[in-house]
Image (cartoon, rainbow, N blue to C red):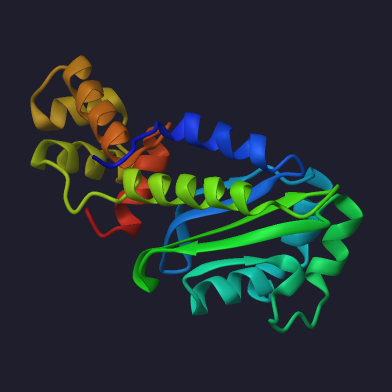
Amino acid sequence: MARTIGLEMGLARLSTFAPAGYALGLHIRFASAQIMVNTYDPRWVEIYTNRGYMLCDPLISWGFGTEGIARWSVLNHPDPHDVLGQAKAFGLTYGVAVAHGPTSSRTIGGFARSDREFTDAEIAEIVEMVRILHRETEPPEHLSAAQVEALRLIAKGYRYSQAAQQIGISESALKARLRSARERLLCRTTAEAVQRALEAKLL
């Protein structure tokens, strides 16, 4: 039987292995991750975002071209903007890159330490956790008709009371449908659920 673990627990587990932080994009489709988690130093995240480094990050380009694992120190991939070099100033000195899944829905992660290289045992644990989270966050192929109807009305700008009246159900029943849709799509908010459903072409 395949090992299972909840999303929050899995992400917390990854934090214990990457004391300098990690960035993990689960199920990247159409250049957007279904779930994106970044625990790197916020100062580096701001620089990385403002300078658009995602477009030239060697870890990301490697991850789309290769399924597997690699220590950053042996990653032989073009880095014209010295992204990895700049990251060292924020404690991202040693790291491992992991890419898993088909190119149409790939999960890519970078995990960092400031003190030493990752051991083989640590890398094995990280890889297993990434594979589990990839499997457990697989986007649904479809939503129920009731979930789609509720999300579509919210996407059109209807308030809960208006959407419920449009469908002919109580507001509490509408909220129950939206809650089930959020759970199905692994989203915290209805706005996120609408966005994710649109990206997955479920609406």
* Viewer-nearest residue: 121 or 190: 121
Which residue is at 91% across, 56% downward?
Answer: 89
Quadrant of the rendering where the N terminus is positioned: top left
The image quadrant of residue 78 is bottom right
Q: Position of residue 72 (x, y in %)?
A: 72, 66
Q: Residue at x 22, y 54 (%)?
A: 202
For this view, does 15 lie left or right of residue 44?
left
Whether residue 197 is visible to the viewer of this picture, yes or no, is yes
Establish if 50 lies above or below 17.
below
The answer to whether residue 3 is left or right of residue 45 is: left
Residue 62 image position (x, y, % from top left): 59, 75
Residue 109 is left or right of residue 93, and the answer is left
Tell me the quarter of the picture where residue 178 sits.
top left
Above or below, 99 against 153 in this view is below
> 163 or 186, which lies in front?
186
Which percent across, then down, holds residue 179? 28, 26
The number of callouts visible is: 0
* Residue at the farthest right position: 89
Position of residue 167 in the picture relative to residue 186 (left or right): left
Q: Residue at x 52, y 55 (%)?
A: 25
Residue in view at x 23 percent, y 45 percent: 152
Q: Please indicate, yes or no, whether residue 52 appears anywhere in the rendered image.
A: no
Residue 84: where, in percent of width, then height? 79, 67
